[in-house]
Amino acid sequence: MFKQSFLFDTLDLTTEMPTAATKAVAGGQLKLIRRGVLEVTPSEVNEATKSIVISAGVHGNETTPLELVDAIVNDILAGTFEIKERCLFILAYPKAINNKTRFLDENLNRLFYKEVAGESVEVDIAKELMADVSAFFAPTPESQRWHLDLHCAIRKSEHFTFAVSPHTLTKTRSRELFSFIDKAQLDAVLLSQGKTNTFSCFSANTHNAQALTVELGQVSPLGENDLSLVDGFNLALRALLCGQLDTIEATSKSIIYGVCQTLTRTQEDFDFTFDAKVKNFTRFYKGDELGHDGETTLTVKQEYEAVVFPNKDVALGSRAALMVTEVNACFNDDYLEFSLPNS
Ligand SMILES: O=C(O)CCC(=O)N[C@@H](CCC(=O)O)C(=O)O
Ligand SMILES: [Zn+2]
């Protein structure tokens, strides 16, 4: 089906990819929808079959997920790994991956919303990917829809792996999804409180999918990743895809944080008080000054707030950091509910 592999054929923009090519494998069929978008269907599909989107490469310099996905597809083709759920594997942004940069014109992972407009490479990609995911989820029960959008963090982190759970008004934080987070040995999970127009947010809000952005360590060049550092995640992901998640024991509980502030850059004159190389989840305490946005001083409001994804140079109107704090969460009717301290 591929000259080299799903990943390296996708990245080889000098060669056409035979869209709609199919290949039967033990226990299913692979169908190349288009460059970078591969649908794998198990031999048996019923109401209980999950439909799982696994996306990687939304940011071109985040390469661990690319290597994990390529290894899974290689094993399916080799017949050594048999999926039992419907899967859509996406390698989202070949040009940025080849360019070894996060994006070319603008951040693709802020463009996943229906009314997206404008002229950029990324807007076109976002529209195509939303259409691919919508087509994949269309014939399926909402309760069986999952989307794991795999990323890496730009900076070092107090938590090497963590997930971001997008905010929705529907039941998209299931006990099963959070059991997966624990079984995948993700150190932490952030509960968003507002729309973020990310890929996982699109699937959760538009298709009521159980969806996460997953951060798998720190960015490094393709082929230079130590995949052993995300073994726990890889094993749980593979167990999920072959319907054997219940064979995986959770050896620890992920710490649950709530997003208590989203710091947005609205002014040219924007800066933080802390060093640009600060680790994700570095803590600041009530009253601490975090920085300024024009004339507005940014301060800590909770007893403590930990900073995640700080980037003072984002485009005006974009998210410059998330501030999070630990929350008490519980499951009500098998869906997670939480409240911020003193809320
Ligand atoms: O390390 C960073 O600053 C960014 C890493 C990354 O790409 N994270 C995602 C998170 C998306 C979300 O909030 O769900 C992003 O910024 O797009
Ligand atoms: Zn990313």
Image (cartoon, rainbow, N blue to C red):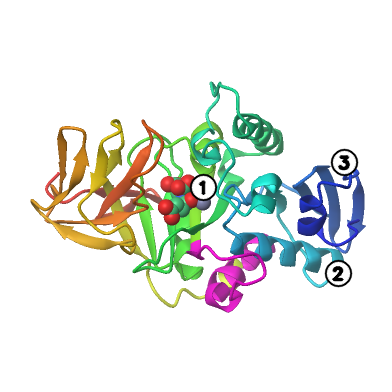
**Secondary structure category for the residue under label 3:** loop
Residue corresponding to mark 3 = 19
Residue at 37% x, 66% y is 157
Question: Residue 285 at what x, y percent from top left?
Answer: 13, 58
Mark 1–mark 2 Cα distance, whole angstroms, equals 29 Å
- How far apart are the alpha carbons under marks 2 and 3? 21 Å
Mark 3 residue type: Thr
Residue 238's place in the image compared with 107, above or below, is below
As helix, strand or loop, the secondary structure at mark 2 comes to helix
Q: Earlier in the sequence, mark 2 or mark 3?
A: 3
Asked whether, in this view, residue 119 is left or right of residue 72, the answer is left
Residue 257, horizontal then vertical, whole percent: 30, 56
| Bounds of the magenta segment | 216-244
What's the amino acid at mark 2? Ala
- In-front residue for pair 165/248: 165
Q: Quadrant of residue 292?
A: top left
Residue at 77 percent across and 61 percent down: it is: 73
Residue at label 1? Answer: 211
Please tell me whether residue 228 belongs to the stretch shown in magenta.
yes
User: Mark 2 sits on what residue?
Assistant: 78
Q: Nearer the viewer, mark 1 or mark 3?
A: 3
Along the horizontal axis of the image, is 16 left or right of 199?
right
Q: Is mark 1 within 8 Å of ligand 1?
A: no
What is the C-alpha distance between the residues marked 1 and 3? 27 Å
Asked if residue 253 lies in the magenta stretch, the reply is no
Is 321 positioned to the left or the right of 155 in the image?
Answer: left
Q: Earlier in the sequence, mark 1 or mark 3?
A: 3
Q: Is residue 40 visible?
A: no
261 shown above or below 284: above
Closer to viewer: mark 2 or mark 3? 3
Residue sitting nearer the eye, 282 or 24: 282
